[in-house]
Image (cartoon, rainbow, N blue to C red):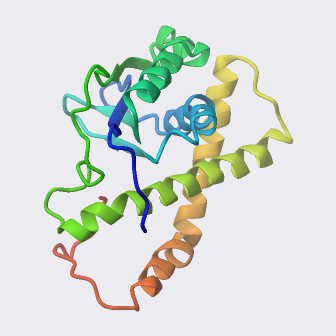
Amino acid sequence: MGQKLPQENGWWYARFRMRWPDKTEPAWHIDPLIAHKIIAPLIHTYANDIAFWRFHRRAARDAEGHQFSFTFYASQETAKRIFQALQSNILLKKLKKAAIISSDVYDDTRSVSVPNIEDTSDGHWKSPLRKSWPFFIMGVCQMWLSLIDEVAESISRKQTPSSLKKVLSFYEQVNQGIKILWQEQGCHSLLHHLNAIFGYEPVLVRELHFRQF
């Protein structure tokens, strides 16, 4: 890989927690909306200052609930500017005012607390994998963001959402389109080709029953 990273860099998190009423499904379509309309422009603006970035999606009935996270590896100054831009984002303010996003949480930029490239990888993994994984997951997230672009463009030829209600409905369609692509073509386009890169070697699966990771 041979990439020399600035010593002052570190990992930074911006977390967005969605309102999730009891006895309802998570509003998964909010995740691609945040990624596409709020975060993607910042990734483009700070492309030369962010060494690695990724998204994380999760929903469980616990303290964090339904949460979408943007994680990136950059300097304190870059993190400060990105967080300031997020906090002043008009769409984010509208989503919070409408109680669609219940809270947004940002790391403290006064010091770098997570400095090493492997520090946000799973601690149970061996060192070579921990150091290499950020390259993999950033590529996955770049592909997902590109899919949002492609699906959104194909839908927007028929409609241009204006109100917040229409924007939310639009991204429900986008999320559904990506879900169908994953279900119908993810096995070959993603899982098969990942397997091929590793020489079709068998992989240890610890749980043999169906599981959503």
85 over 168 or under it: above or below: above
- Quadrant housing residue 129: bottom left
Furthest residue toward right: 157
4 over 18 or under it: above or below: below
Quarter of the rendering occupied by the C terminus = bottom left
Q: Position of residue 171 (x, y in %)?
A: 62, 36
Name the residue nearer the viewer: 27 or 8. Answer: 8
Q: Going by the image, does 163 lie left or right of 89?
A: right
Quarter of the rendering occupied by the N terminus = bottom left
Seen at 32% across and 43% down, the residue is: 7
Q: Going by the image, does 164 lie left or right of 98?
A: right
Q: Position of residue 97 (x, y in %)?
A: 50, 8
Name the residue nearer the viewer: 26 or 137. Answer: 137
Q: Position of residue 147 (x, y in %)?
A: 64, 54
Seen at 13% across and 62% down, the residue is: 124
In this view of the protein, can residue 174 be seen by the observer? Answer: yes
Seen at 55% across and 39% down, the residue is: 32
In this view of the protein, can residue 25 be seen by the observer? Answer: no
Q: Going by the image, does 44 lie left or right of 32?
A: right
Name the residue nearer the viewer: 99 or 123. Answer: 123
Q: Position of residue 15 (x, y in %)?
A: 36, 29
Furthest residue toward left: 124
Furthest residue toward top: 97
Seen at 68% across and 34% down, the residue is: 170
- Quadrant housing residue 111: top left
151 over 13 or under it: above or below: below
Name the residue nearer the viewer: 146 or 123. Answer: 123
Number of numbered labels in the structure image = 0
